Image (cartoon, rainbow, N blue to C red):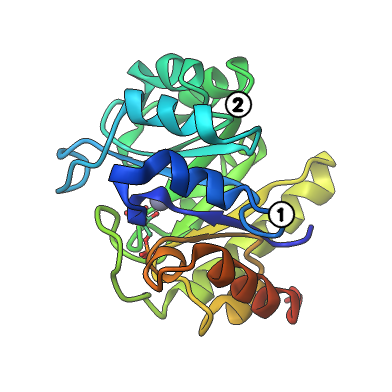
Amino acid sequence: MAPLLAPSLLAADFGRLSDETALLRTPGAADWLHCDVMDGRFVPNISFGLPVVEAISRSAGGLPLDVHLMIEEPGRYLDAFARAGATGLTVHYEACPHLHRVLEQIRALGCLSGVALNPHTPVAVLADIIADVELVLIMSVNPGFGGQNFIEHTYQKIAEARALIERTSARTGRPIRLQVDGGVGEGNIGRLVEAGADVLVAGSSVFGGGDPVAALRNLRRAAAEKQYQGQ
Ligand code: DX5
Ligand code: ZN
């Protein structure tokens, strides 16, 4: 699967959110829109919630809305985020004692079901749930804030997750996306694609330089030069 770019609106100018979102619809810019929802409990920061996701959805022009829930008890809010326009809902493994049920709920809502792993959570915890997952998100920073440094150990985790996904897809015939989030930029995107990532989230490297469309084109060029190297 060709790598997809999912700019994170956490790094956008919230005072001009509809303009920023509309800009990302420029051909060759975003493939998905990444929305970071934080509750001040699962992570030590509060970002935005349902009304803002709904506003982004109104300006998304049909781009998939990839909603990353960094919240406790995400099962209580799935229905509301789906109604707000989410097309994918990713919950944290660490926030879900009943992960299988939560993933079933996401699929029943017609959304792509994702599971995120914090930097300290091993890929191996997915062994008994991977066949029920449609997207694996490897966090390459501690969730909660944009603009942090990429954690180098992530390359190894991406490779492990890709190997698990390949084995699972060979058995089930279903594709599973592998997303990476945090500190992604032109300097590391190629190596992430080589390790097996196929959805790249980027916040500050897209919005930090003042020209998000140009930044996304550069990221896409850097990603397209590489491909998954296999095991
Ligand atoms: C971090 C969020 C990320 C964040 C990425 O908790 O999940 O999506 O916006 O921002 P950058 O690309 O600046 O690290
Ligand atoms: Zn995110």
- The residue that label 2 is drawn on is 111
Residue at 37% across / 69% down in the picture? 208
Image quarter in which the N terminus is found: bottom right
Density class for disc 2 (Cα within 10 Å; few <14, some 14-19, many ≥20) is many
Which structural element holds mark 2? loop
Looking at mark 2, is its residue's CB closer than 8 Å to ligand 2? no
Which structural element holds mark 1? loop
Does residue 159 appear in this view? Answer: yes
Image quarter in which the C terminus is found: bottom right
Question: Left of 194 or right of it: where is 75?
Answer: left
Query: Considering only vertical position in the picture, is 198 above or below 79?
Result: below
Density class for disc 1 (Cα within 10 Å; few <14, some 14-19, many ≥20) is few
Q: Nearer the viewer, residue 155 or 214?
A: 214
Nearest to N terminus: mark 2 or mark 1: 1
Question: Left of 167 or right of it: where is 157?
Answer: left
Tell me where residue 122 sits by quadrant.
bottom left
Q: Nearer the viewer, residue 72 or 84?
A: 84
Residue at 46% across / 44% down in the picture? 19
Residue 44 locus on image (x, y percent):
14, 48
Residue 126 locus on image (x, y percent):
52, 47
Residue at 78% across / 48% down in the picture? 169
Residue 32 locus on image (x, y percent):
60, 46
Q: CA distance from mark 2 to mark 1?
A: 24 Å
Q: Quadrant of ligand 1?
A: bottom left
Query: Considering only vertical position in the picture, is 164 above or below 229?
Result: above
Looking at mark 1, is its residue's CB closer than 8 Å to ligand 1? no
Residue 125 locus on image (x, y percent):
46, 50
Question: Left of 26 or right of it: where is 100?
Answer: left
Tell me where residue 91 sits by quadrant.
top left
Q: What label does residue 27 carry, if any? A: 1
Which kind of residue does numbered mark 2 sit on? Cys
Q: What label does residue 116 carry, if any? A: none
